Amino acid sequence: MMDFAGVPRAGYQANGTYVVSGEEEKLACRQIKDRLEILSRELQTLPQQAAYERENTPATVGSAIGRMFGGPDAGLDATKEYQRAQAESDALKGLLARKQCV
Protein backbone atom coordinates (compact mmCIF):
# COMPACT_ATOMS: atom_id res chain seq x y z
CA MET A 1 0.00 0.00 0.00
CA MET A 2 1.05 3.58 -0.52
CA ASP A 3 0.18 6.56 1.58
CA PHE A 4 -1.25 9.76 0.12
CA ALA A 5 2.22 11.06 -0.75
CA GLY A 6 2.92 7.97 -2.86
CA VAL A 7 5.52 6.60 -0.46
CA PRO A 8 5.46 2.78 -0.34
CA ARG A 9 4.41 1.19 2.94
CA ALA A 10 5.56 -2.19 4.16
CA GLY A 11 3.96 -5.21 2.53
CA TYR A 12 2.76 -6.07 -0.94
CA GLN A 13 2.68 -3.20 -3.44
CA ALA A 14 0.29 -2.59 -6.32
CA ASN A 15 3.17 -2.97 -8.79
CA GLY A 16 3.79 -6.56 -7.64
CA THR A 17 6.77 -5.89 -5.40
CA TYR A 18 7.13 -6.32 -1.65
CA VAL A 19 8.56 -3.81 0.84
CA VAL A 20 9.96 -5.26 4.06
CA SER A 21 8.54 -3.88 7.28
CA GLY A 22 10.43 -2.34 10.17
CA GLU A 23 9.82 -5.55 12.12
CA GLU A 24 11.33 -7.62 9.30
CA GLU A 25 14.32 -5.29 9.21
CA LYS A 26 14.98 -6.22 12.84
CA LEU A 27 14.99 -9.99 12.19
CA ALA A 28 18.18 -11.93 12.66
CA CYS A 29 19.78 -13.59 9.65
CA ARG A 30 18.60 -17.04 10.78
CA GLN A 31 15.00 -15.83 11.03
CA ILE A 32 15.13 -14.35 7.53
CA LYS A 33 16.59 -17.57 6.16
CA ASP A 34 13.85 -19.60 7.88
CA ARG A 35 11.17 -17.43 6.25
CA LEU A 36 12.90 -17.80 2.88
CA GLU A 37 12.86 -21.59 3.30
CA ILE A 38 9.11 -21.52 3.88
CA LEU A 39 8.61 -19.31 0.83
CA SER A 40 10.82 -21.62 -1.23
CA ARG A 41 8.61 -24.60 -0.39
CA GLU A 42 5.52 -22.58 -1.32
CA LEU A 43 7.10 -21.59 -4.63
CA GLN A 44 7.71 -25.27 -5.37
CA THR A 45 4.12 -26.39 -4.70
CA LEU A 46 2.11 -23.46 -6.07
CA PRO A 47 2.68 -24.29 -9.77
CA GLN A 48 1.03 -27.69 -9.25
CA GLN A 49 -1.87 -26.02 -7.46
CA ALA A 50 -2.22 -23.58 -10.36
CA ALA A 51 -2.29 -26.48 -12.83
CA TYR A 52 -5.02 -28.16 -10.78
CA GLU A 53 -7.05 -24.92 -10.66
CA ARG A 54 -6.56 -24.40 -14.41
CA GLU A 55 -7.98 -27.86 -15.16
CA ASN A 56 -11.08 -27.39 -12.99
CA THR A 57 -14.13 -25.20 -13.23
CA PRO A 58 -13.60 -21.73 -11.69
CA ALA A 59 -14.98 -21.52 -8.16
CA THR A 60 -16.06 -17.87 -8.40
CA VAL A 61 -17.42 -15.51 -11.01
CA GLY A 62 -14.30 -13.36 -10.62
CA SER A 63 -12.07 -16.34 -11.42
CA ALA A 64 -14.15 -17.19 -14.48
CA ILE A 65 -14.00 -13.63 -15.80
CA GLY A 66 -10.27 -13.45 -15.10
CA ARG A 67 -9.69 -16.58 -17.16
CA MET A 68 -11.88 -15.34 -20.02
CA PHE A 69 -10.18 -11.99 -20.39
CA GLY A 70 -6.76 -12.38 -18.79
CA GLY A 71 -5.34 -15.59 -20.17
CA PRO A 72 -5.14 -19.12 -18.80
CA ASP A 73 -3.41 -18.20 -15.53
CA ALA A 74 -5.44 -15.08 -14.78
CA GLY A 75 -7.90 -15.47 -11.94
CA LEU A 76 -6.05 -18.42 -10.40
CA ASP A 77 -5.52 -18.10 -6.66
CA ALA A 78 -2.33 -20.18 -6.79
CA THR A 79 -0.86 -17.89 -9.46
CA LYS A 80 -1.57 -14.82 -7.33
CA GLU A 81 -0.05 -16.52 -4.29
CA TYR A 82 3.01 -17.51 -6.34
CA GLN A 83 3.56 -13.91 -7.44
CA ARG A 84 3.19 -12.66 -3.86
CA ALA A 85 5.56 -15.32 -2.48
CA GLN A 86 8.11 -14.52 -5.19
CA ALA A 87 7.93 -10.79 -4.43
CA GLU A 88 8.36 -11.38 -0.69
CA SER A 89 11.22 -13.80 -1.33
CA ASP A 90 13.01 -11.27 -3.53
CA ALA A 91 12.62 -8.55 -0.89
CA LEU A 92 13.91 -10.81 1.89
CA LYS A 93 16.90 -11.85 -0.23
CA GLY A 94 17.67 -8.16 -0.64
CA LEU A 95 17.38 -7.75 3.14
CA LEU A 96 19.85 -10.62 3.64
CA ALA A 97 22.30 -8.90 1.31
CA ARG A 98 21.91 -5.53 3.06
CA LYS A 99 22.51 -7.19 6.43
CA GLN A 100 25.51 -9.01 4.94
CA CYS A 101 24.25 -12.39 6.11
CA VAL A 102 26.42 -15.28 5.00
Image: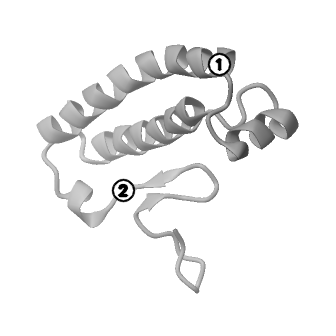
Q: Please say if 55 is above or below 99.
A: above
Mark 2: secondary structure: loop
Residue 59 coordinates in the image, percent (x, y): 61, 35
Q: Nearer the viewer, residue 77 or 16?
A: 77
Residue 40 coordinates in the image, percent (x, y): 36, 24
The residue pinned by badge 2 equals: 20
The residue pinned by badge 1 equals: 56
Residue at horizontal 13%, vertical 46%? 28
Q: Nearer the viewer, mark 1 or mark 2?
A: 1
Taking the image as shown, residue 89 lies to the left or right of residue 1, namely: left
Residue at horizontal 54%, vertical 58%? 13
Residue at horizontal 55%, vertical 37%? 83
Q: Please say if 34 is above or below 55.
A: below
* Rendered image: mark on residue 3: none
Mark 1: secondary structure: loop
Q: Please say if 12 is above or below 55.
A: below
Residue at horizontal 48%, vertical 35%? 86
Of label 1 and label 2, which has the lower sequence position? 2
Q: Nearer the viewer, residue 47 or 34?
A: 47
Q: Please say if 60 is above or below 25.
A: above
Taking the image as shown, residue 8 lies to the left or right of residue 75, namely: left
Q: Which residue type does callout 2 highlight?
A: Val
Residue 11 coordinates in the image, percent (x, y): 42, 59
Q: Quadrant of the C terminus?
A: top left
Residue lying furthest right in this view?
A: 69
Q: Nearer the viewer, residue 42 or 3?
A: 42
Q: Which residue type does callout 1 highlight?
A: Asn
